[in-house]
Image (spheres, rainbow, N blue to C red):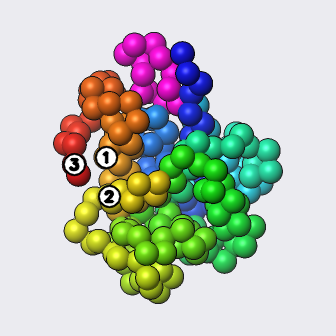
Amino acid sequence: MSQPRNVAILIFDDVELLDFTGLFEVFSVAGRQDNSKPFNVYTVAEKSAPITTRNGLSVNPQYTIQDCPQPGILLVPGGQGTRREINNAVLIDWIKHCSQKAELVLSVCTGALLLAKAGLLEGLKATTHHTAIELLKELAPNTTIQTDKRFVDNGKIILSAGIATGIDMSLYVVARLLGKDQALQTAQYIEYDWKPEL
């Protein structure tokens, strides 16, 4: 059996809860039907202190950006905290550095703003939460913003629109990496009415 892919989920104060917990669940549950564990899913934050999500839930990160395993898949969620973190040079540099070795870089919602700030969206297609379209255009003027898509796949970099669309994107990624049957089994297990796209 091959080694599971490391899935690092970045969290920060005012992160949108469903942006990362929905994907955490999908990647954690994938493979459960056949007792495989294709993904090693963990949270990572700038510091080890608990972070407070957008709606006030306290979450303890499993790793910090200094000690986390190298991600095969890097997930950058959104939330109001992204407006602050786009000015956090330490975090932006970490995203840029991790993305160089990662197999895939995913964003949900306004996580796209952080990818834009890290210079990862140059010449690509992107989407984000509908309330952040104009800000994304400012941060990534050479990016084609697709407001009519739930998610867009650029190959290595895949972005989803607002909040719940991240679940669709994560199932799409499971299908891309492990096959559509595995994604359908995962959706069935979590009782999510998934309609494959793209």
Helix, strand or loop under label 3: loop
Residue 94: percent from left, percent from top: 70, 60
Amino acid at dot 3 = Glu
Q: Earlier in the sequence, mark 1 or mark 2?
A: 2
Q: Is residue 178 left or right of residue 52?
A: left
Give the labeled residue for mark 1: 168
Nearer mark to the viewer, of 3 and 1? 3
Q: Residue at x 60, y 36 (%)?
A: 6
What is the quadrant of the N terminus in the image? top right
What whole-number distance in Å separates the C-alpha atoms at marks 1 and 2?
A: 8 Å
Which secondary structure, mark 1? helix
- Among the two numbered marks 2 and 3 on one chain, the one whose residue lies closer to the N terminus: 2
Q: Which residue is mark 2?
A: 151
Task: Check whether the beta carbons of the residues at disc 3 and disc 1 lie within 8 A of each other.
Answer: yes
Q: Which residues are magenta?
A: 28-39
Query: Looking at the image, do the residues carrying marks 2 and 3 touch, with CB atoms under 8 Å apart?
Result: yes
Q: Are marks 1 and 2 in contact (CB under 8 Å)?
A: yes
Identify residue type, mark 1.
Answer: Asp
Q: Residues within 10 Å of mark 3 (few under 14, many from 20)?
A: few
Name the residue tied to disc 3.
Answer: 197
The residue nearer to you, when weighing 36 against 32, is: 36
